[in-house]
Image (tube, coloured by chain):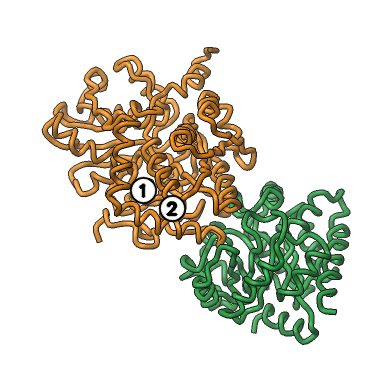
Amino acid sequence: MKLTDLPDSRGHFGPYGGIFVAETLMAALEELRVEYDKARNDPAFIAEFEYELKHYVGRPSPVYHAKRLSEQYGGAQIFLKREDLNHTGAHKINNTIGQALLARRMGKKRVIAETGAGQHGVASATVAARYGMECVVYMGAEDVIRQAPNVFRMKLLGATVVPVSSGSKTLKDALNEAMRDWVTNVESTFYILGTAAGPHPYPMLVRDFQCVIGRECLTQMPELTGRQPDAVIACVGGGSNAIGIFHPYIPYEDVRLIGVEAGGSGIASGKHAAPLSAGSPGVLHGFRSYLMQDENGQIIETHSISAGLDYPGVGPEHSWLKDAGRAEYVAINDDEAMAAFHDLCRFEGIIPALESSHAVAQAKKLAPTMKKDQIILVNLSGRGDKDIDTVAKLSGITL
Amino acid sequence: MSRIGQTFIALKAHNKKALIPFITAGDPGKGLTVPLMHALVEAGADIIELGVPFSDPMADGPVIQRASERALANKVGLKDVLAMTAEFRKTNTTTPVVLMGYANPIEHMGYETFALAAKAAGVDGVLTVDIPPEESAGVSDVFKAHGLDPIFLLSPTTPESRVEQVAAVAGGFIYYVSLKGVTGSANLDMDEVAQKIAMIRKHCSLPVGVGFGIRDAATAEAVARIADAVVVGSRIVSEIESAPEGACASRVGHLVAELRRGVDAASK
């Protein structure tokens, strides 16, 4: 079986993925699976999706040669896939448009979403406004504080933001709460899941909607450089921007695929969010994958400067790509990500999201080990406006 | 035959229905669970459902979620739950114990290792909320091989075609979740429940228990008229939550005795 043929009909990527939910959700997931299967084979659906990506999101997003950054880092040439230039400022909108179109097809008038950094919440609130749907966004109470500007954006767009105070008050708890809402309102409600995780068919359909990133790169890189890159780097929380750029590159065996997890205060400190680097397989949020868990199989709290990477699990396809050896996964610590954030601001005039800064930081490590005519493609998954409060606070500045 | 099967046969012989209360192991305290289990039996429980605490109880409402958080704060994990069951079995060898929880703690221990340890501790059935029949290969067969009944859920959204599929892998009894939503939700439509149970019985010979939305003797009686077992969770757990220190077992005992009267009134 080819790596690109997965998942199987029940959502398995080797031992990972699947459908691990209570019986109450099984019918809804089956309905979604059937409906998505029809939609992805429907030329009209695909045409509308592509129209929206072009005219509403502003795709294709450019690939940009970061010459000054490449000089500074010394070694390989660094190219940035500019997902930060999308409408709403991140790759998340690719997926929310796809799912909102599905929701409309299925006659659902209410959409719900979970969010960590707030990017997916904003992207969901945006499409709900665009298609005239009611929108409720669940967000960890901790994240509501960390990402106040995005909370206000969601409210401006007409969404209701519900702070979640259970557990660690972050993304995983928001996800639990969104699932509970869905169980309760399953007939009227479409759950717009924000990353390539959760029960089947979500990991597959989110990947499919995000693959536009990698497909564009397959065309853009030869146009710009005459060939495909030597390495593709993307940050991995749940892993949707990474799988979106990786997946079309899987058959290109000479291209290294490098996923960057949040190393927090360092893997050795235990305060991180790097299940692929330092976790073990388990079942959470409806699927099997690498997880951060303790000796009793309880999910442990994660730590990252970046709310969007602060998640104890990872999309099942990444677990599979890791075990299959097709992708490598590394961890970047908070301080390394911060340094890369400032580098990109000062050398290229681009304020990146803290999530994406993890990918830039890995390029900083990798580039000097490569030749000047080699190429690294970094997925710059989002812009950093939402993070300026966090960065200011870390620098001891009050805005 | 398992203790669960024997219990249902014995009840049927006396024209009675089963009362199955739920508590979360380790809530409110590590040392209080075994005394609470005995109190449940004294007050009229036929089978005990013992919740295994999990950090992310996705299918539970706020009441049981808080119980899980309290139990985890008391450092109660799956091994402790097995130890509590073994302790309970020292003086009670007849009341079946069903563990109810999520896949990950069991998966982390290993399904085979867990099944061996659970059987040795005196566990009779296991309900893993987030393992549907589709994912149960390598789980329910392992449980069955070790003499544990794999309990499965059916819900109002389960289509008739799936009921057979569930019946093929299930053991012990069927747990019909009578409402959409998480545990602790309100309001029960008894006619709808009765219709669903009739449909389930067409495809499955196991006893059918009904849970979700049962909060007093009247709702327990109504459910006992149409089902083989009445499962009560959130109502008992909120009693535990609100009981003053030291009064937990007696308060829960009163409540379960009231539910018992409701269940028995259905057989008169």
Residue A309 appears in view: no
Q: Is residue A371 left or right of residue B210?
A: left
Q: Note whether B205 is above or below A213 in the view shown.
A: below
In the rendered image, residues at marks 1 and 2 fall on the same chain: yes
State which quarter of the image contains the N terminus of chain A.
Answer: bottom left
Identify which residue is drawn at 80% across, 85% down.
Answer: B14
Where is residue A278, by image quadrant?
Answer: top left
Residue that label 1 marks: A318
- Image coordinates for residue A41, horizontal then vertical, percent: 29, 54
- Identify the residue at image location x=71%, y=76%: B228
Q: Is residue A388 visible?
A: yes
Dots 1, 2 in contact, CB < 8 A: yes
Among numbered discs 1 and 2, the one appearing first in the sequence: 2
Relative to the observer, which residue lies in front, A312 or A12?
Answer: A12
| Quarter of the view holding residue A242 | top left
The percent coordinates of residue B233 (x first, y second) are 73, 60
Q: Which residue is mark 2?
A: A289
| Chain letter matching colour orange | A
Q: Residue furthest bottom?
A: B13
